[in-house]
Amino acid sequence: MRLQRLSEQVIVITGASSGIGLTTARMAARAGASVVLTARDDVTLRQEVERIREQGGQATHLAGDVADPEVLHAVARLAIQTFGRIDTWVNNAGVGIYGLAEQVSLADMRRLFDVTFWGVVHGSLAAIPRLRESGGVLINVGSIESEIPVPFHSAYAAAKHAVKGYTNTLRLELEKEGAPIVVTLVKPAAIDTPFFDNAKNYLSGTPQPPPPAYAPEVVARTILHCAQKPVREIVVGGAGRAFIGLTGQLPRTSDRLFEATMFAAQTNSGPRRTDRAGTLHKPGEYNGEQRGQWDGYVREHSYSTALALTPTPRLVGMALLGAAAIGALSLLSSASARHNVARLATDARERVRGRALSSRASARLPANVRVAPAQRATGFVEFDERLAELPLLS
Ligand code: NAP
């Protein structure tokens, strides 16, 4: 299926007031897309829309809770009224809880599901009738936790597994029907966003991304790639790919590894927030921020993700191009060596005294040639007949 270029697209993004959603919205607007932003924080969304418009972009917003299906239908109507159609819909809003499975209240678990799973369902149901009309892409943001277990994340990992099950089933049904809709699941690894500060926290430590953490731009670029090229599902971050591979192939080994590392890796003893309720029931206080408080190393690129998004024919083309480039370089370097040598030989035969040698040629002179260090450095040498007998010249 042929998808529109980003500059011609109308893109709806949920969870657009912070982190991945905000980064994606800014990047899409800069690329010329018309963006429709939604999240609960009306003030931040309004500011963001103004900012995009000031920079010459097109944007509108509607604030609301993704747990309410009516909000998402209203967002879809706003997109159609304002821009005439929807090309890509990104279900990105989500929230986390840190706590042992037995610690976390059922009410909190259910609320997490309302947002992180049901928000995706509500968004999908609002988007599909509109995407069916003119064709487009539905992108659901899952997580590597759609595939792997992570301690302290029982409800979150369960919700992300549910997002995967829902998304993959939806794809089958829409494809069977022949609907012109690409359904994509994006599964980020740990990303440096305010997610960790926004999560409800039952633990004594402060939540942090288990290293390595990737920049939200890496996910945003992936989402916007998927908006233009059909992709079934994609893991963002090579570390996430490795965790998923290990869990799939050696589940007991990965259990042991996660037990040994993931408890400690997910919290630090840094200053604890006084408000530990997080954003389960209210907008985040770090809204307007793309990145979180994590002060560790953040990877700005994921080469494995970039490679995974490179279609096979292009990959083969790139390999052939690479081989051709290496061949050409070695030919060129041997040609340039021959050229230099020939020049030395000519110069030597002419026995030119006091003529300037290029610094490159002078550097190639062997030790038995009488050249003062200063001359060798500047490239100015007195030629010697013996140059003509250098082994290089053969
Ligand atoms: P974030 O910075 O905390 O952003 C979450 C966004 O969701 C905010 O815009 C928030 O806006 C919105 N949101 C939360 N609850 C909502 C509700 N009830 N109704 C409407 N909007 C709501 O986190 P992020 O890292 O960018 O997360 C974006 C997505 O990526 C989530 O689905 C998350 O699960 C997923 N993800 C994140 C990571 C990571 O390591 N960061 C890894 C894998 C997957 P308001 O507060 O204004 O409502």
Image (tube, rainbow, N blue to C red):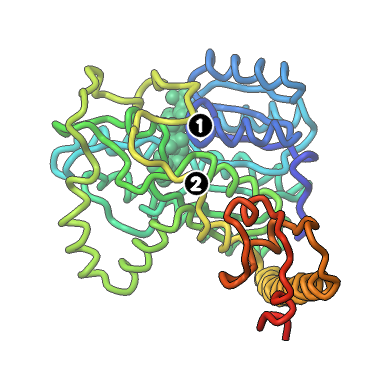
Q: Is residue 35 above or below residue 332?
A: above
Q: Tell me where residue 239 sits by quadrant.
A: bottom left
Percent position of residue 356, x then y: 78, 55
Q: Say if 256 sits above or below 34 in the image.
A: below
> Residue 107 vs residue 368: left or right?
left
Q: Residues within 10 Å of mark 1 (few under 14, many from 20)?
A: many
CA gap, disc 2 and disc 1: 11 Å
**Is there CB contact under 8 Å for labels 2 and 1?**
yes
Write the residue at 72% across / 16% down.
54
Which residue is located at x 39 percent, y 54 percent? 144
Residue 297 visible somewhere in the drawing: yes
Q: Please, is residue 176 above or below residue 277 in the view?
A: below
Farthest residue, direction bottom: 394
Q: Is mark 1 within 8 Å of ligand 1?
A: yes
At horizontal 77% and vertical 37% (from top left) the residue drawn is 85
Residue 202, given in percent of the width and then of the height, sits at 18, 32
Q: Nearer the viewer, residue 307 or 57?
A: 307
The image quarter in which residue 307 lies:
bottom right
Depth check, front residue: 391 or 273: 391
Q: Quadrant of ligand 1?
A: top left
Pointer 2: what residue? 141
Q: Earlier in the sequence, mark 2 or mark 1?
A: 1
- The crowding category of the residue bearing disc 2, from other C-alpha atoms within 10 Å (few below 14, some 14 to 19, many at least 20), is many
Task: Name the side, left or right, on which 177 lies relative to 301.
Answer: right
Please give the residue where the numbered disc 1 appears in the rendered image. Answer: 15
Q: Secondary structure at mark 2?
A: strand
Tell me the element at label 1. Answer: loop
Q: Position of residue 141 (x, y in %)?
A: 50, 46
From the viewer's perspective, is 268 left or right of 1?
left
Percent across and percent down for residue 22 are: 55, 30
